[in-house]
Each structure stands twice: as structure tokens, then as C-alpha cells.
Image (spheres, rainbow, N blue to C red):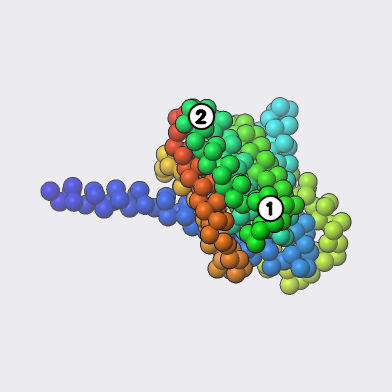
Amino acid sequence: MTPCMNDQPRSLASTLFPVGLLLIAMASIQSGASLAKSMFPIVGAQGTTTLRLIFASIIMLLLLRPWRAKFTTNTLRTVIIYGMALGGMNFLFYMSLRSVPLGIAVALEFTGPLAVAIYASRKAIDFLWIALAIVGLLLLIPTGATETAIDLVGAGYALGAGVCWALYILFGQKAGAENGIQTAALGVMIAALFVAPIGIVHAGAALLTPSLIPVALGVAILSTALPYSLEMVALTRMPARTFGTLMSIEPAFGALSGLLFLHEYLSLSQWTAIACIILASVGATMTMRREAKPIVAVD
């Protein structure tokens, strides 16, 4: 009787532990995005992306030591595309934050992994998830001039980030097949090299502003190093489908983070749109084929 009573709490704890890690990771990513937005007045979205990726690459290079990985010519080509997709995803997402609330930007960006999940399943019920996602997009991007209308250029940047996120997933799976997590460190370094010239041209000497260094380091840790590490631990302790389903609520974390840290208030229709995209992502993840890979986010 006693061993059974002791096993139940341990089983509950082992179930809740990875869920807690994943929730912390999502909160960390969106908190980092909120902090990053405070850098825009000084170095712009371009410079902010550059500083974040440079510091993140240094941290991940020291932690993961990717030089120990072995790459063939084909694998290296895939890693380069993966890194460029990662850089484009970060750059376009931060560009969207200049004129689009954080929660809406995350929801629009999430259409990328949602498309990958639907493609991985291709069942009849996926038309329902597609319809939900379309309803969410129509609510977020109204065609008429309304009080809830968002900047179309910013929305375009967020959707572009979603395309890069989809490429990041597809090529990340191929690139990581041989070297696993070490691929991520090399990918972040390639992303930094890809975006840095844009940030340097835009911000110039402002990138060296001493007061920005601790903020940029905080963004790199909150948005990359900490959440990516927590996600990797969580992924090894829960089913891939559960992981993907929980990741689907990230737009809600983005909206809440924008509300708490940036005072970005959304309308009822915008919250409804975010809910539609979350439901579409949850549904697509739940119905995807069992062999399909989970969605890992490095925003």
C-alpha cells in the first residue's frame, strides 16, 4: 500500500515537471521579446536582432561547442540554409514588432509552423484547422479601415517570419539528424553572420552603446539560451504530440507579455483571432501523423 501511495506523487511530479519547464520557456521567450522592443529607439529592430544573435551565438558556442560536430558537404549546405532561415525569422519578427503588438505578431508568425503541422498530417479534418486559421487571419487583418486594423507592412513582416519559421523547422530536422543540438549553435552563428551586416549598416556605432550591452545580453539569454535549453529538456520528458500541443499556446503568452510589459491592449476581435489560431495549431498538432516531428521554437 505504501509504495503505491508514494509512486503516485512521483508520477504526477514527473508529468508536471516538463510541462512547467515548457511554460517557463515560452514565458522567457516572450519576456525577451518585450525587453528587445525597448532597444528599438536606440539601434532599431535591425540592430536589436544583430546584438541578440551575436550574444546568443557566443553563449551557445561556449555551451555546446559545435566545432566537435562532423559535417559532410550536403549537411553543411543544409545547416547554412537552416541558419539563414533562423536569422530571417528573428529579423522579420523584430521588424514586425515596430508596428504590430507582440501577441498579434506571434500569432501571425505561428502560421508557419501551423502550415508545417497541417502538411505533416494531410487529413480531411485539417480543412477545419485551415478554416480556423483563415478566420483568425481575417480578424487580425481586416480589409476595411477599422479601429482594430493593424499595420499591413508589419503584418507582412510577421507572416514572412512565419515562412522562415517553417523553413527553420524543415531544414532544422535535416541538419540536426546527424549532430543534434550542436547544430543549433552553428545555426545561430550563421544567423548572426547573415543579419549582422544589416544591423551594422542601420545602427552603426550605436551598437557599441555601453548601456545596451546588459540589455542585449538579457535578451539573448531570455529569448534563446534559456528557453532553448528548457525546451530540449522538456522534449526528452514528454511525448512529441504533447510538446507540440503545449507550444501552440505561445501566441497567448505573447499577448499577455505585450499587455504586462508593453501595455499593448488588444480588442475582443484580436483576442478572438489569436484564440482561433491557437485552436487551429492545437488541432493540427493533435491530428498530425505520429511520426511527424514536433515544432521547436527559437523566436
Of callouts 2 and 1, the N-terminal one: 2
Q: Position of residue 38 (x, y in %)?
A: 69, 68
Q: Residue at x 73, y 37 (%)?
A: 80
Q: Nearer the viewer, residue 85 or 148?
A: 148
Instruction: Say few, some or many: other residues with alpha carbon within 10 Å of mark 2 (under 14 / 14 to 19 / 20 or more).
Output: some
Tell me if residue 298 comes above or below residue 271 in the rendering: above
Q: Secondary structure at mark 1?
A: loop
Q: Quadrant of residue 98?
A: bottom right
Instruction: Give the tally of numbered discs.
Output: 2
Q: Residue at x 83, y 51 (%)?
A: 197
In 3D space, how far apart are the residues under numbered discs 2 and 1 (Cα atoms)? 34 Å
Q: Is residue 263 left or right of residue 189?
A: left
- Label annotation for residue 144: 1
In the image, what residue type sits under mark 2?
A: Ser
In the image, what residue type sits under mark 1?
A: Gly
- Evaluate if marks 2 and 1 touch, with contact meaning CB atoms under 8 Å apart: no
Tell me if residue 61 comes above or below residue 47 in the rendering: above
Q: Position of residue 290 (x, y in %)?
A: 45, 30
Q: Residue lying furthest left in this view?
A: 1
Q: Residue lying furthest bottom in this view?
A: 211
Res. 29 visible in picture: no
Q: Position of residue 189 (x, y in %)?
A: 72, 47
Q: Secondary structure at mark 2?
A: helix
Q: Is residue 83 left or right of residue 106?
A: right
Q: Nearer the viewer, residue 153 or 67?
A: 153
Q: Residue at x 73, y 28 (%)?
A: 73
Q: Position of residue 283 (x, y in %)?
A: 46, 39
Q: Nearer the viewer, residue 44 or 236?
A: 44
| Mark 2, residue position | 121
Query: Closer to the observer: label 2 or label 1?
Result: 1
Q: Residue at x 51, y 38 (%)?
A: 129
